Image: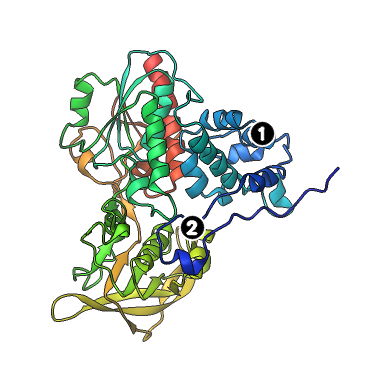
Amino acid sequence: MPQLNLNRVEMPRQEPKERAKNFNEVALGYTHEQAMEEAMRCIQCPKRPCVGGCPVNIDIPDFILALKEGRMEDAVKILKSKNALPGICGRVCPQETQCEEVCTLAKKKAPVAIGRLERYVADWERMNLVGKKKSVSPAPSTGKKVAVVGSGPAGLTAAAELAMRGHNVTIFEALHTAGGVLMYGIPEFRLPKVIVQGEVDYVRSLGVTIELDSVIGRLLTLDELLADGYDAIFLGTGAGLPTFLGIPGENLNGIYSANEFLTRVNLMKAYLFPSYDTPVRIGKKVAVFGGGNVAMDSARCALRLGADVVYIIYRRSEAEMPARKEEVENAKEEGIQFKLLTAPKRFIGDERNNVKAVECYQMELGEPDESGRRRPVIKPGSEFTIEIDVAIVAIGTSPNPLIAQTTKGLETTKHGTVVVKDESTGRTVKDRVWAGGDIVTGAATVISAMGAGKRAAADIDAFLRS
């Protein structure tokens, strides 16, 4: 019997010096031979801990076994039976803290590269099964109508699950392109638009109608949707309202929220300049404030747009950074400079009200705060200045208050998130309204939003059938 390979197969990537100059996908994906070699590492353990570690409960050993045996259409079918967006999840889901973290092989060395294999199967489907019969088909129509507000990961997942159960689903999307944060918030080099569009098209193929440029709360209220014949509503509008630093000078020209900056780069195609003359300031000295994936995305976009130097300014140490480890490593390889244990004090402007510098404090870590991370404390007399011409604030977001303000009986927290009775169902206190994803939890991961959409869809289905 051949010896088990404890080392995972590495995925090819663009070289750092090359990729820092383009918006093409950084990770190039497995070849067929690499995917088969990695699939061979799965030992098909009977307890299947990886399935429990997946927020949408993909039958991971089953799809890997089908891949290993060359049954590619079966692998696709197994994936799609639990996850409508595998091409997305295989790229941006933090498997290292979920399914891969509890993989049996992780006790020995490297876990099976579940996300990379998921990506491989999804990409194989996209290249080989276009125009062919769908791997899964919806149930007969129930005659029930469901409105899904928002076409991000929670909304797309809920819509797909409900359509598969035979319900008539309409998604209302505020922007001109479906996909939510998958389209406007994640850069092309990490999640290509063609991948997202393919997943959106798949959801449409299940019979889901998508109404674009439809701002619920203005076009129609939730109560008007219910009065118009919808039997249930799922809210998956995410958390698109940016949080700012609240320091002097933050209203100077050249200071963006990460939400605005990434939307301009992604939906307004700044990455295709000069073909698209997007109104975005392209700085030469850029500071990005924050330590999450959004901060890494913003910094790496600024570099690709032509910045000479890009700083990540973060008030804690690298150990406390919430960003995925691989995204931090990618940023470092590309030349992003990390100013850790550093916090902004004030922005400094020139005579034309353009930002020209940021004054910062040096920090040190004290006792843990409510998040469990050590609290950053200012070092007295440690102020210093960094010259910049663009600043991007990536310290978090909260839900847009429009729906809450136009809906009686919808309860929200002081942070603007929608209150649900039970996260296992997503039911809000308002009758016939469910919610899930960032609108409930605040900014979180794509896969956690998908899990919430899936759980809510199951409860909506049970409600409609009762």
> Which element type, helix, strand or loop, lies under badge 1?
loop
From what the image shows, is residue 401 above or below residue 162?
below
From what the image shows, is residue 100 above or below residue 137?
below
- Quarter of the image with the C terminus is top left
From what the image shows, is residue 262 above or below residue 439?
below
Give the quadrant of residue 109.
Answer: bottom right
Q: For the residue marked with disc 1, what is the amino acid?
A: Gly
Give the quadrant of residue 342.
Answer: bottom left
Given residues 51 and 132, the one toward you in this image is 132
Q: How many labels does the image show?
A: 2
- Percent of width and height locating residue 331: 47, 66
Q: Tell me which residue sits at (45%, 58%) in the image.
A: 370
Given residues 426 and 114, the one toward you in this image is 114
Distance from Cα at disc 1 to Cα at disc 2: 27 Å
The residue wearing badge 2 is 26
The residue wearing badge 1 is 70
State the colouring used for the structure image: rainbow
Q: Tell me which residue sits at (21%, 38%) in the image.
A: 213
Residue 421 visible in the displayed image:
no
The answer to whether marks 1 and 2 mark residues whose Cβ atoms lie closer than 8 Å is no
